[in-house]
Image (cartoon, coloured by chain):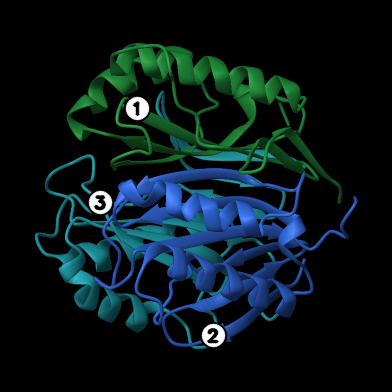
Chain colours: A cyan, B blue, C green
Amino acid sequence: MTIVRHDTNARMSQAVVHGDTVYLAGQVSDTAKDVAGQTADVLKQIDALLAKCGTAKDRILSATIYLADIKTFGEMNKAWEAWMPAGHAPARTTLQAPLAGPQWLVEITIVAATTPPGQ
Amino acid sequence: MTIVRHDTNARMSQAVVHGDTVYLAGQVSDTAKDVAGQTADVLKQIDALLAKCGTAKDRILSATIYLADIKTFGEMNKAWEAWMPAGHAPARTTLQAPLAGPQWLVEITIVAATTPPGQ
Amino acid sequence: MTIVRHDTNARMSQAVVHGDTVYLAGQVSDTAKDVAGQTADVLKQIDALLAKCGTAKDRILSATIYLADIKTFGEMNKAWEAWMPAGHAPARTTLQAPLAGPQWLVEITIVAATTPPGQ
């Protein structure tokens, strides 16, 4: 199986495709100030990266969600559920953890498939 | 490769099967009060989800274990090792993290194979 | 697809190969005292485990990096970037979390491919 990397620098790639599995780097927002806004930004970035890999949010296999403050769980979920297409939600784990930038309130790490939708 | 989801709601699926790889949602216990009991519950839930996906605990590839208090590492391990079939333990990472429900003391996230045992 | 485990005990395997995907246990250092030294040790251990699985650091798909103190992000990155071959960096997520041993300052969990390099 081939390995294809996207947006690669000395530290990381934003996306790595191995055969028909896609691994995204943890996505964070550098613009929005609150969890609702940062989650919306992160989900847009995930859409863009999945598109680069030839796939989309209806083929996410697993998500790990890191919140700087677990009390924002409800706000994050509201943005998440508005974004997720019905019947296609992935396996998910959410936990609280301090992130690499103190301004980051949420970080989401995705594993997805390139398999065509409906299959 | 096909994608098959189990126990899917607006937020997540409890299990997603992609080809011959299975991704489980982070499992927690809503009944037991201590780490030993919660770990036993979580491991039973993992057994049930893997069975739904046509596989079992002898084909787990990796486990990430989140403990609300890392001082319960020994109690969790006792339940884990009693459950794990000899010679089949997965790659594992354990860390401390506050979980989404304050009553949750342990959460376990599993990636498994549907490959037949012994192979 | 076959499952091959390496360095397996009652609790975990240090590496599990499923088809052409490799899952490593979270790697920690029991010798170095600071983050720079522990990261260098961990990366050497990753090299050795990947070699056992017939692969190498130019085929890492994703890395999750746990730091006991996120303020050591810069020191960890210096060791990481010195080690990573240009153009081959994986998808990566870094967070702060207390680890299972209080002496451990960094833990790194790797998913890699056995796919030949350049592919």
Viewer-nearest residue: C3 or B107: B107
Give the CA distance from mark 1 to mark 3: 17 Å
- Residue type marked 1: Trp
Task: Give the x, y percent position of residue A34.
Answer: 11, 64
Give the CA distance from mark 3 to mark 2: 26 Å
Kindly identify which residue carries mark 2: B8
Viewer-nearest residue: C68 or B36: B36
Kindly identify which residue carries mark 1: C104
Viewer-nearest residue: B27 or A13: B27
Task: Give the x, y percent position of residue A88.
Answer: 54, 80
Q: Quadrant of residue C45?
A: top right
Give the secondary structure at mark 1: loop
- Residue type marked 3: Ala
Q: Is residue A62 above or below residue B84?
A: below
- Residue type marked 2: Thr
Q: Do the dots labelled 1 and 2 sit on one chain? A: no
Q: What residue is rendered at 49% in x and 61% in y?
A: B108
Q: Quadrant of residue B14?
A: bottom right
Q: Is residue A119 something that shows in the picture?
A: no
Give the secondary structure at mark 3: loop
